[in-house]
Amino acid sequence: MEATELINRVKNFLEKNYYAELSEQVRKHENFLIIQFPKLSQFDPDLADYLLETPEEFFKAAEIAIEQFDMPGDSKNFIVRFTDLPDSCRILIRNIRSKNLNKFLFTEGIVRNKTDVRPKVTAARFECPSCGNTLSVLQLDKKFKEPSRCSCGRKGKFRLLSKELMDAQGLILEEIPEQIEGGAQPKRLNVFLKNDLVSPLSERRTNPGARIVVSGIIKEVPKFTHSGVQSTDFDIMLEGNSVVSVDEDFSDVNISEKEMKIIKDLSKDKNLIKKLVGSAAPSIYGHEKIKEALILQLTSGVRKVRDDGIITRGDMHILLIGDPGAAKSQMLKRMSLVAPKAKYVTGKGASGAGLSASVVKDEFLGGWSLEAGALVLANKGIVMIDELDKMTKEDAWAMHEALEQQSISISKANIQATLRCETAVLAAANPKFGRFDPFDTVANQINLPSTLINRFDLIFAIKDLPNKEIDEKMAKFILSMHQSSKTTQELDTNLLRKYLSYVRLNIKPKLTDSAIDELRNYYIKMRSSASDKGIKSVPISARQLEGLVRLSEAYAKLRLSDKVAKKDAQNAVELLDYCLKQIAFDEETGTIDIDRIATSMPASQRNKIIAVKEILIDLENKLGKTIPLEDVVAAAKEKNFSEAEVEEIIQKLKNSGDIFEPRHGFISRI
């Protein structure tokens, strides 16, 4: 196509379709115009094809065409940006080949890394010292170019008069997990953005972890060997023309007026919780309480920032510990589909750096750069961690700060940074010996630091116990699922996601006095129940009280209420009580003991150790440093200890280094 013909056709298209928008952009001093590709395709199909085949020429023609309009203002260097490209232009990062170079295409991916916005030279003007002639040089390559020679014959040094600068930024785009075939490693692509694509408003769309669709021109970038010689290999880069973020965050979910009416009607339904629970994981039988907790987790409590700078998290963390085949992983997978922003990782495949953040040396960006892990990438979303118990202890430590403070601090290779990770964690783990032992503590049965277990608001123990009636119903349910792929769910997944997104973002309920009384009474009743029986155990701690507040707020949010009523607090108490009775109930004393979760030793066991230590001190005062074992057993029997219990406690004290055996049958304190 002739240059003048191309310019006229572009000018004609803009005049008839985008003249008003163009004059508005010029008035605002914005030098870009967003065009829907289908409009161009409808108006002039040949011109649309020309754009896809030779985009460089098209954009130059569009720039000249806009300059020809008589606009009241500066309409120079105008850029046209295209959205809604046809599916024929979609390309996967792994499928980019040399035939795609200099073509107009679009691809989708997750931002893994990005550089800072820096000025880049586009053109420079030089003056010849001999004749005073002015020379302009376009800066298209990475190296800064000077004129090779002047018309007067001078080849030497030229004086730089001025240079044109523009803002530029580099991104590293990675394939989205759904596009990766089994066993393949995700491929990456360098993306180059400039001008308005790196404005503060647009930059928020391209934060690491964001899912974006980028359209632009595929270009080759020369590579240089260590000796400075240009290599025959070239790198590829996508020069961005437009960036659109994909609905991935709770705040990005669009709700129509019709859907808004359905949401409001649904919130008034008396069977609301039942309907939501029925839609949470319809292909999994039973576990109503767990499903209810998962719905509350997606709703979350209210995040509070206090005047003194202390932040109380609103996100809830849930841990599912259970026997194999109890559909834990299925629940996690289902929740990753319901949550608008979710990351799914497994314990063995996740390292501490992969979860929190790591510092990497990057070729494209140069120097050291920070790469965000799963917890940071899912900021304001949810992370599912399967097989949490298979994670190494060192990697599990990386989660401590993320779970409670909701930030990740990193100090490595001259990078000191604190990253936000307002992320809810849903984890699943198996007991240490394959199946649950109902008589042992949870902390003993799960291969995790007790300090990490304690940070979970709700811990559910899923026990697979034979029961004829339940087994019959489950078998019928599972076999009918295999017979037909249809599931009966009250609410469509899309509506459920929109409902939870709306309540999470827009409802910020406050505690009423009646709700506060309900929570306080439960807390005091639980704390005093143990001391009444004379047992030095801690039934629940302040951490559980905060968890109760979050649960109450989530119940109020589901009703679209701005006040936490007494009923919400009662529901929260009921759910927490259900959890604690499953995992923190001490059979021996008949009370709830939080130490069964928070530490590896229940309070009743610790009290016995203290009692034996007291016996040892008494006997040492009477008999001297070396104490016969028989005397210890006899003194303990008076306090209703069995011989086996005493021997077990003495063995524990030996292991911990509190006592030693100077000779057979005698013990001494250290």
Image (spheres, helix red, strand yellow):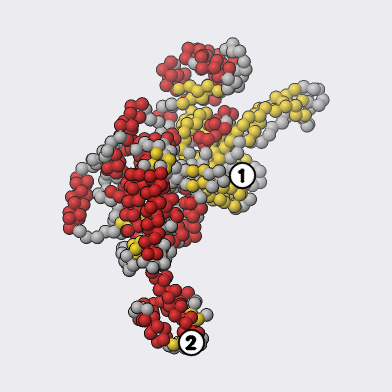
Residue at image location 30% in from the left, 32% down from the top? 265
Image location of residue 412, percent across then percent down: 60, 53
Work out whether residue 181 can be spotted. no
Image location of residue 624, percent across then percent down: 51, 87
Residue at image location 51% in from the left, 41% down from the top? 208
- Which residue, given by chain and number where applicable, does mark 1 sit on? 366
Q: How crowded is mark 2: few (under 14 residues within 10 Å), some or many (20 or more)?
A: few
Rendered view: 585 above or below 23? below
Closer-to-camera residue (179/145) = 179
Mark 1 → mark 2, Cα distance in angstroms: 73 Å
- Foreground tag (1 vs 2): 2
Q: Which mark is residue 622?
A: 2
Residue at image location 40% in from the left, 37% down from the top? 562
Residue at image location 59% in from the left, 15% down from the top? 67
Hey, what amino acid is under mark 1? Gly
Closer to the N terminus: mark 1 or mark 2?
1
Q: Residues within 10 Å of mark 1 (few under 14, many from 20)?
A: few
Q: Is mark 2 on a helix, strand or loop?
A: helix
Rendered view: 432 above or below 648? above
Q: In this view, does 264 lie to the left or right of 627?
A: left
Image location of residue 538, percent across then percent down: 41, 62
Image location of residue 340, percent across then percent down: 40, 39
Q: Is residue 584 left or right of residue 620?
A: left
Instruction: Tell me where residue 251 sits by quadrant.
Output: top left
Residue at the outermost right position = 130
Closer-to-camera residue (631/256) = 631
Hey, what amino acid is under mark 2? Lys
